[in-house]
Each structure stands twice: as structure tokens, then as C-alpha cells.
Image (cartoon, grey):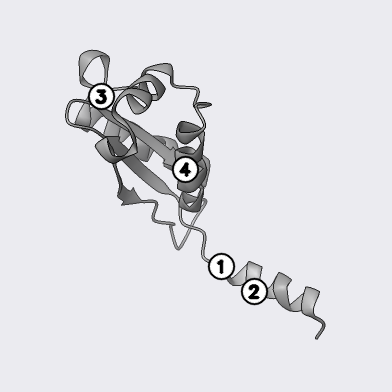
Amino acid sequence: MDHKKELKEMYKEIKIEAGVFTMTNQQNVFVGSLNNLKRLNGFQFMLKTNTHTNKELQADFNTFGHDAFDIEVVEYLKKKEQGYFDPKKELEKLEQKWLDKLQPFGERGYN
């Protein structure tokens, strides 16, 4: 097997996990979801390069710095074994569950 084919096979075997995460500082929380949690690095990169679309989160990140925030995956998306499964819809429902639970709106959060 050539090297390129071998790399493709290895890539196919990588487990992709979707889920909901929080980014919190002492006062506020941001709730988000990703269909591939490995993209959390990209989320943090946008903040570090001052290009994040959430202006309030970006402003606090710029003011308080990276060390003032904690990122935590709060729940992984569990795939159904049987029947129809729409991962996008299920991830939206999971994120909404956490938005309802944490209420990160207004003075309490960034959503």
C-alpha cells in the first residue's frame, strides 16, 4: 500500500466526536457546539487573533486574556444505534438543552 493510501485509511479511522462546550470566566459563560470537537483549537485561535464573531466574548478575551477562561466539553453527542439519526439536528437540540440549563444571556453570558 502506498503512503498516500495508508494516510487516507488512517484518516477514515479517526473518531470524530461532536458535542457541546462551555467557555467561562469568573462572571460569564459562552455555550457552543461543534460537529467536530477537534475544531476547538480553531475556536480559540479566532479569539487569539481577534477575529471571533462574538464581539462581547472577543472584547472580554482581549481584556482578561486567555488564562481567565476555561473551556470544557460538557456533553458529547451520542449517536443512535438504530433508526434515523440527523447529527446536525441532534447537536442543535443538545446545545439548546445547555442554553436552557445555563441561561448564558445578557449579563450572565455571551449567547
- The residue wearing badge 1 is 14
Circles 2 and 1: CB atoms closer than 8 Å: yes
Kindly give the residue lying farthest to the top in the view shown.
Answer: 106
The amino acid type found where label 3 is placed reads: Pro
Q: Residue at x 25, y 24 (%)?
A: 104
The answer to which of marks 3 and 2 sits earlier in the sequence is 2
Which one is in front, 72 or 100?
Answer: 72
Q: Residue at x 42, y 39 (%)?
A: 33
As measured in the structure, the alpha-carbon distance from the residue carrying label 4 to the one carrying label 2 is 22 Å
Q: Residue at x 36, y 43 (%)?
A: 20
Circles 3 and 1: CB atoms closer than 8 Å: no
Q: Residue 88, image x and y in percent?
A: 51, 41
Which label number is shown at residue 34?
4
The amino acid type found where label 4 is placed reads: Leu
The amino acid type found where label 2 is placed reads: Met
Which one is in front, 7 or 44?
Answer: 44
Instruction: Please tell me in which quadrant of the rendered image residue 97 appears.
Output: top left
The answer to which of marks 4 and 2 sits earlier in the sequence is 2
Q: Residue 96, image x and y in percent?
A: 34, 31
As measured in the structure, the alpha-carbon distance from the residue carrying label 3 to the one carrying label 2 is 39 Å
- The residue wearing badge 3 is 104
As measured in the structure, the alpha-carbon distance from the residue carrying label 1 to the one carrying label 4 is 16 Å
Name the secondary structure under disc 4: strand
Name the secondary structure under disc 2: helix
Circles 3 and 2: CB atoms closer than 8 Å: no
- Note whether 73 is above or below 92 in the view shown: below
Which label number is shown at residue 10?
2
Within-10-Å neighbours for mark 1: few <14, some 14–19, many 20+? few
Q: Is residue 69 left or right of residue 82?
A: left
Circles 4 and 2: CB atoms closer than 8 Å: no
- Note whether 42 is above or below 55 in the view shown: below
The answer to which of marks 3 and 1 sits earlier in the sequence is 1
